[in-house]
Image (tube, helix red, strand yellow):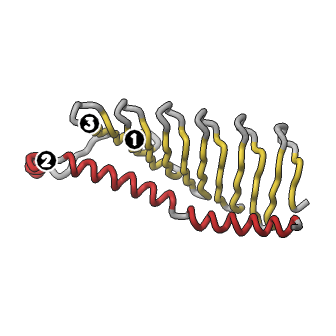
Amino acid sequence: MTTEERLENLERELAREKRRNRLLPAIMALAVVGLSLAWILTQTTPDAYAQAAARPKVVRANMFILEDETGRPRASLIMHHSGPALDLLDEKGRPRVRLAALKDGSMMGLIDEKRKLRAGLTTIKDGSMLNLADEKGNNRVMLMAHQSGPALDLLDEKGKTRATLTVSKIGPKLSLLDANDKAIWSAPR
């Protein structure tokens, strides 16, 4: 199989995966919101509905804390200087999901029990990026879509880019790099 045939196969596979994963961030966000609403509705008693009806319809604040039945914080909605953020917390009060609307974009992060960001989706004015990290919190996969074109970077455990696939106006490029950022293989050459 020639290099061109391999590159065409890789491009077809990347396009297929891109189509499959196009809706993944929206589905994840809807699932988080749906699960949160379902949990809130199952925890609300008829008395709580009656009390809520008697309360004012508008509440204004800079921070809301949602607590479980024992008084432990399980979610927070906070207005930061950079914009609002929603954190969903585990039973120990550690952030596990973060949604934020920033001045220049938005972000969604999935955080592990050691407080390491393991997956992040960020949008800004001229593009978006999906980061996947290892158990140490080091980025290992970065998928970007920006004005100059899409790019996929694969990083080693030290955070060095070892493989990159880009598509620009002049065409696609696949590069393999050593630990010193020196290209060991590149196509087209």
Q: CA distance from mark 1 to mark 3?
A: 12 Å
State which tag comes first along the sequence, 1 or 3: 3
Compared with 95, 12 (above or below) is: below
- Which one is closest to the eye, mark 3 or mark 2? 2
Question: How many tags in the picture?
Answer: 3
Residue at figure coordinates x 32%, y 37% from the top left: 74
Residue at figure coordinates x 40%, y 58% from the top left: 30
Packing grade of label 1 (10 A; few <14, some 14-19, many >=20) is many
Q: Which mark is residue 45?
A: 2
Q: Would you name the residue on which mark 3 appears?
A: 67
In front here: 2 or 26? 2
Q: Would you name the residue on which mark 1 appears?
A: 87
Packing grade of label 3 (10 A; few <14, some 14-19, many >=20) is some
In front here: 111 or 85? 111
Q: Are marks 2 and 1 in contact (CB under 8 Å)?
A: no
Residue type, mark 3 in image? Glu
Residue 50: x and y in percent read 8, 50
Residue type, mark 2 in image? Thr
Q: CA distance from mark 3 to mark 2?
A: 15 Å
Label 1: element kind: strand
Q: CA distance from mark 2 to mark 1?
A: 24 Å
Residue 117: image quadrant is top right
Residue furthest to the right: 189
Residue 1: x and y in percent read 87, 67
Q: Which mark is residue 97?
A: none
- Which one is closest to the eye, mark 2 or mark 1? 2
State which tag comes first along the sequence, 3 or 2: 2
Does 33 sit left or right of 104 as displayed? left
Residue type, mark 1 in image? Asp
Does 73 sit left or right of 155 as displayed? left
Residue at figure coordinates x 76%, y 52% from the top left: 164
